[in-house]
Image (cartoon, helix red, strand yellow):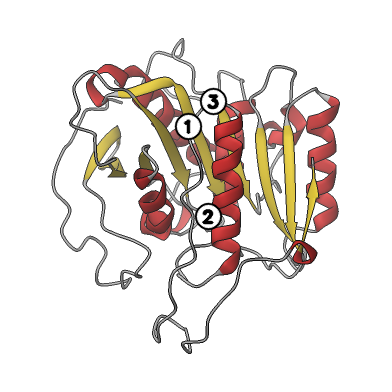
Amino acid sequence: MRAFLFFAPIILLHAAVWALPPNSREPDTQWVYKTVPGKDLKMDVFLPADYSSEGKRFPVMVIFHGGSWAEGESNWHWPDCTYWSKRGMVAVSVDYRLKNRDQVKVPLECVKDAKSAIRFLRSNSDRLKIDPNRIVAMGDSAGGQLAAATATLSDPKINDDAYDLSISCVPQVVVLTCPWFKTAPDLCPPKHLREGSPPFITFAGGSDTAIPVAEMIEFHELLKEQDIVSELYIGNQGKHGFCNGRNPYNRFFYWSVDLTDRFLVKHGILDGASMVSIPKIEKGFGSSGKEIRELAESEYQSFL
């Protein structure tokens, strides 16, 4: 297997299946991070405004979508990428192999792709103008398992030969929303935590019937037992996928992005203050035109 750089302007990518919400924009380009039999695997790339500046290196937000490793689209996280690129990061949303589309064994091949995506970024950091020491892995649901796997699963069999395995796939920070850890033990991140793992920030829904809150509290406590930095936030009324930004008026989306921004500042990935602001509400995209408000402290729980 091999990987190479691919730069191209993106025009109305996925337009047939998804209307672009007002809190999002189209990616600037795509990068091919790995070639597998029959296809190139790509990531949608959102560049910061000053990307052309000479001599500058940028932190990277690497996002893995959910969908039970069976379905899903990289465009689901364009709203996230839009924010993080405004915040001065190179933000990428990764397309990885899926059970229904690619007929592969999951989540094993998905984990291999996730690791390859980060190794691609690190091995090409000079050319891509990114800081290999400021990489953040983020994932929702099944994508949360992938993000956590890059930081925890070290068995050499859970890799492929696309890159030199001496290049680390471990990010500096992990961001999880409703992570789905119901996998075989060798692919289950909570069973492979070890001292020295990067900091985790996790968001869970209090009304998530797929992933009980008790499981997320147990995960947080396991991290703490290994002296791994962990912050857990529970949105009391949140259901599975409740932090998704495809609804531009989803209060939980802005709440989770703001807390993540502050976490990244705390751990040296970003500088300055969060730029999150709830947009002015207009009719459309599921909104009646009623104004939305920030999440009140009574609407969520914090475990620090």
Earlier in the chain: of badge 3 and badge 2, it is 2
Q: Which residue is mark 2?
A: 66
Q: Tag on residue 70?
A: none
Q: Quadrant of residue 23?
A: bottom left
Look at mark 3 in the image and give the residue it sits on. 268
Q: The C terminus is located in which quarter?
A: top right
Identify the residue at image location x=40%, y=33%: 60
Query: Which one is nearer the viewer's eye here, 154 or 218?
Result: 218
| Element on which disc 3 rests | loop
Which residue position holds label 1? 271
Q: Which sits in the foreground, 44 or 146?
A: 44
Q: Secondary structure at mark 2?
A: loop
Q: Is residue 68 above or below residue 133?
A: below
32 shown above or below 245: above
Residue type at mark 2 is: Gly
The residue located at (48%, 89%) in the rendering is 288
Amino acid marked by disc 3: Gly
Few, some or many residues within 10 Å of mark 3 (<14, 14–19, 20+) = few
The N terminus appears in which quarter of the rendering? top left
